[in-house]
Image (cartoon, grey):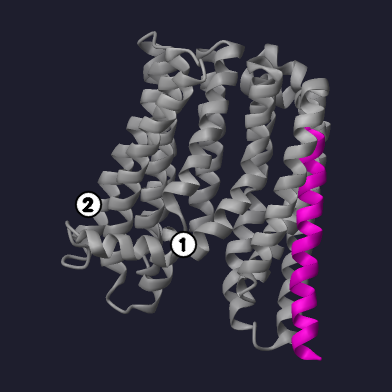
Amino acid sequence: MLGAGEGVSRVLGVLAYAALARVLTVDEFGIFTYAMTLGLLFGVLVDFGQNALVGRAAARDTGEGGHIVSAAVSNKLMVGALLAAGGWAGARLLGVSSDEAIVIALMIVWAAALSALDAVRGFGRSRGMMVSDSIINGSESLLRVASVLAAWFLGLRLVGVAFAFASASLVALFVYLWFVASRHPGHIPTRVPVKRRLAVFAEAAPLGLSAIAMAGFYRLDQVFVRTLAGSEQSAYYGAAARIVFTAGVVAIILAWAAYPELSRASHDKRAFRAVLKRSLGLAVAAGAIGTVLIAVGAEPLLVAIYGQPYAAVTDILRVLSFVVLFNAVSVIALQAANALHLDRRVMVIASVLVAINIVLNVLLVPIFGAMAAAALSVAGEAALAAALLAAAVRATRAESS
């Protein structure tokens, strides 16, 4: 059921992008995808590991899950508002246009609301609310598509579309929060003391630091393309990246399914390696199929989704298609590392790769544009997959020897 909800959400995400490509000019689309990436980067700061904390507390059924989810939602909305204001002010100080600064702020609000929604969803899933989780996951994406179409109908452009995105995520958050609270009356308080909210933020910090390192690895490429190569290249890269992101859904679902088995087998290294091998086999098969399909059908796929102007993205998408294959390995390897409590090692690996990625992007993107970012993404994903898998395998051998 979770897989169906996530699959529908990814497909609707592509439809939202397809609508955006027709509502906005290529330059505006580039600005929007850049602002969205910034929003998601700030969203990691907004979360700071609190979602993982919510899921863990609720799953253990200690009675603290509801209080933690309330504290997390409050923290996220407050921090999100502050970061949105700071993002707008910082953009203006850097000479960014008024419209683009507003879009950046609205995308931070959008990401903060989605992060808060994920906290509520985590609590609901831990209480067995799988059907409603899939419904809200798909509904939020559907609402996003509808809001883009409404902005299109009303003749709104860049700022209007960003406002539509932010509004859709906030509506989904408060509707689902009300629904979950009504199903578990008394479990989710409407107010949490400031001291308790700060304690939740501090308790989640170790998880948050690891998440920030991973986010830096996955999100900075779009930022570099926009700032170093311009909005048109940003549009092209964002269009291709969205298709690749959607194609990775099969590996994500397999990783979700594998994680409980890997966790249960973490004390039996032979069983752990068997689960890891089986999960990797399925994920690699799915990733290879996705890579081939995207590489072969790149041009018709781009034209069908975004329109004829995006046929120019064909070569970029063919290069990026290999991310689907390597990401299939890295998502399984990451879950294996998490099951073995290798959080610190994951953070070190991601941080080192981020540093290398930053240097190479700064050197190559101004010369080769989005194609350089695509090639670096593939190389980085391959390196991440190899490093995470090696860490997990090494840990099982060390402990079994």
Q: Marks 2 and 1, how far apart in space?
A: 27 Å
Note whether 113 is above or below 296 in the view shown.
below
| Picture residue at 41% right of the left edge, 17% below the top | 159
**Left of 271 or right of it: where is 372?**
right
**Left of 256 or right of it: where is 224?**
right
Note whether 35 is above or below 251 in the view shown.
above
Q: Amino acid at mark 1?
A: Ala
Which of disc 1 and disc 2 is earlier in sequence? 2
The 10 Å Cα crowd at callout 2, few under 14, some 14 to 19, many 20 or more, is few
**Left of 191 or right of it: where is 314?**
right
Q: Quadrant of the C terminus?
A: bottom right
Label 2 SS: helix
Q: Main secondary structure of the magenta part?
A: helix
Q: Magenta stretch containing residue 381, yes or no?
A: yes
**Left of 284 or right of it: where is 194?**
left
Q: Magenta stretch containing residue 260, yes or no?
A: no
Residue 194 screen position, x and y as percent: 23, 58
Question: Which region is colored magenta?
Answer: 373-401
- In the picture as drawn, the residue positioned furthest to the top comes out as 155
Residue 321 seen in the current view: no
Q: Which residue is mark 2?
A: 178
Residue 262 screen position, x and y as percent: 64, 76
| Picture residue at 60% right of the left edge, 20% below the top | 30
| Towards the viewer: 156 or 136 | 156
Residue 164 screen position, x and y as percent: 37, 25
Check residue 205 in the rendering and tell me which mark sits there, or answer none. Answer: 1
- In the picture as drawn, the residue positioned furthest to the bottom comes out as 401
Check residue 119 in the rendering and tell me which mark sits there, or answer none. Answer: none
Residue 98 screen position, x and y as percent: 42, 13
Determine the image quadrant of residue 119: bottom left
| Picture residue at 82% right of the left edge, 21% below the top | 367
Note whether 360 is above or below 127 in the view shown.
above
